[in-house]
Amino acid sequence: MARTRAPERTLLPSDEPLSLLRKDGTPVDDSPLSMPDDDVLVELHRRMVVGRRFDTQATALTKQGRLAVYPSSRGQEACEVGSVLALRPTDWLFPTYRDSVALVTRGVDPAETLTLLQGGWHLGYDPYEHRVGPQCTPLATNTLHAVGFAHAARLKGEDTAALVLLGDGATSEGDTHEALNFAGVWKAPVVFLVQNNGYAISVPMSKQNAAPSLAHKGIGYGVPSVLVDGNDVAAVYAVVREALESGGPTLIEAITYRIEAHTNADDATRYRTSDEVAAWLDRDPVDRLEAYLSARGLLDHARRAAVAAEAEEFAASVRAKLNVDVVPSPDELFEHVYATTPRHLRDQAAALREELA
Amino acid sequence: MTTVESQVSMAGALNRALGDALAADPTVLVFGEDVGALGGVFRVTDGLAARFGEERVFDTPLAESGIVGTAIGMAMNGLRPVVEMQFDAFAYPAFEQITSHLAKLRNRTRGRVSLPVVIRVPYGGGIGGVEHHCDSSEAYYTHTPGLRVVTPGTPDDAYRLLRDSIDSPDPVIFLEPKRRYWAKGALAGEPIPFDRAMVRRTGRDVTLIAYGPMVATALETAEAAAEEGWDVEVVDLRSLSPFDDETVCASVVKTGRAVVVHEASGFGGYGAEVVARVTERCFHHLHAPVLRVTGFDIPYPPPKLEAHHLPHVDRILDAIARLQWDDEVVGSYRA
């Protein structure tokens, strides 16, 4: 059978990350991507600014002992915000523990977003209310949940795609590969967004991966792959939206950088230089979009001030909510283990109540 | 099932349960390795793909974590997956998905996410299987809160327990005693609650507590014991977790003696939990320590040596004989 184009060509990513905006905010002339509409760009900006303020607030609350731990996504706002705003109303998000900014962008209450990290329960929100799967702490296990969810939607005749977030380290886990394979075989509507932020805690890409890029891993599973500049929110939005609408699986690697340490408990100076961090600060995703919007006349001083004020207000509400220490009743430890609590757990709950009386 | 039917094998009963569940509920799916055209390596899914179509009964890529992980996602989206792990030891790649997610998502989400997933696992030895095909892996699962773990001992119970498992809002590890797949029986039983044990044979002198593949062995032992003058009661646990203390303790309180039988290794095994529970609850009714007859604390043996490892009638009779019938001091411990 004659072929006009080698099929693997459609599966491989571009040699260079796709982008719409250069690091100085000037538009890329020959990008194959479509620039999002102006109102989308303005909204992307607002959400990134608010998301960043939320992130710095959560880090501050951790230093004050209000959160047990906080994995910051500072520097990764283009991925967190761009991908979530690309979701259509019927789509689902399957996040990890580092995706708090994605969750608040999705509309999850900040206190419910931080319940896991605050330590009140393992999850604070109702997945069905926001179409957001539980924050996944073990790496890559959520990729399979996303594939199963999306395949079920297909079987039920629903137009729902799943967006699963994972990091560079998670691409080494077996579940990522099983998920890509299942998604390829089932042609499931799943978008795998790998936020390659350079380090899996302390381990750099050179010790994680020997492929030309993480996006190259898609071809082995018949999954089309995309390499994108993960600090270009317009580009992230465009590639994720296109992938969600494709009806099949896509692997997207977004090149970005984690400005903060892995968590407040990590010491990043042991494995990377301040020069490296400075170079990435120079590629800041918020600055880049602001430069573009300003040049286009879409972001004036008043608008900037209004967004900054909104971010401050949001941070204040996060502080207020997190400064109230919510500890569930110990009874609840036994209530959700099974649909109907069995006898032995009722007995144990009674024993604990008696002990606490 | 209300009428007595002709004899059917356990594999046949399981096949019928799957077919009836697929017919009764359009959200039920059956998938795994070789469950489609082949009908499963033990033919438990025989004919189901042809009858219900490849959207509901299908082969997956060969990856157990993938099978369970995608089943979790499907259940989150309103379906009721029934998945097959081809053999006991081949389920281990799915262990993280089972223990970290399947078992815990209801609790993690404060009851908002229900995962009605059934994982069918052919388990245990006695079929001459090579390494990795004969494990008794029940204790790994029973040690995990949030899972139900059940195992049938008869074709009738295989049908009933599987239907109940598929209807359950909780995830179920459904352990199928593969050496009993071909044993036949009638599908006629009275309905009994999902998580209750069952007295398979009544007796006055001693209670044999067994499950899965050892139910038949325990009943055989009871017949042999009768010839020696012991009237043996056999309790089939059915639900390993949650555990039916009431039925088990009622029997032990009546007989005053008990032996727990399972194929799995004894150390840290499921029988240790049973002995502890019985001793804690029935101590003043016991005439002798509760003993265990289990597999040795060794990796599962090669086929030509497995008969030494598996509990058998004579070994169980020996344990019964050691239950202080003449007030002599006995026990498994030798100083």
Image (cartoon, coloured by chain):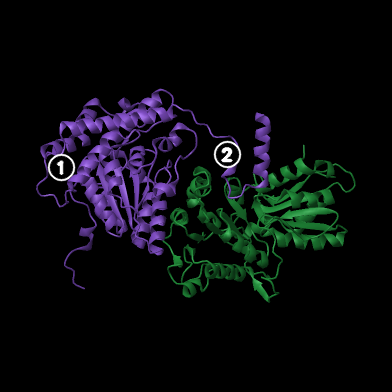
Q: Position of residue A44 (x, y in %)?
A: 24, 41
Query: In this view, which residue lies farthest toward the bottom?
Result: B6
* Residue B281 placement: quadrant: top right
Q: Which residue is mark 2?
A: A332
Could you tell me which residue is drawn at 43 percent across and 45 percent down? A134
Amino acid type at circle 2 is Glu
Dot 1 falls on which chain? A
Judge the density around disc 1: few (<14), some (14-19), many (≥20) Cα neighbours within 10 Å.
many
Q: Relative to residue A65, is residue B302 depicted above or below?
A: below
Q: Which residue is mark 1?
A: A21
Could you tell me which residue is drawn at 30 percent across and 47 percent down? A193
Q: CA distance from mark 1 to mark 2?
A: 50 Å
Q: Position of residue A261 (x, y in %)?
A: 33, 29
Q: Colour of chain A?
A: purple
Picture disc at residue A328: none
Q: Circles 1 and 2: CB distance less than 8 Å? A: no
**Residue A294 seen in the figure:** yes
Residue B294 vs residue B53: left or right? Answer: right
Residue B215 vs residue A20: left or right? Answer: right
- Which quarter of the rendered picture does the C terminus of chain B lie within? top right
Q: Secondary structure at mark 1?
A: loop
Could you tell me which residue is drawn at 37 percent across and 44 percent down? A95
Residue B279 vs residue A86: left or right? Answer: right
Dot 2 falls on which chain? A
Q: Colour of chain B?
A: green
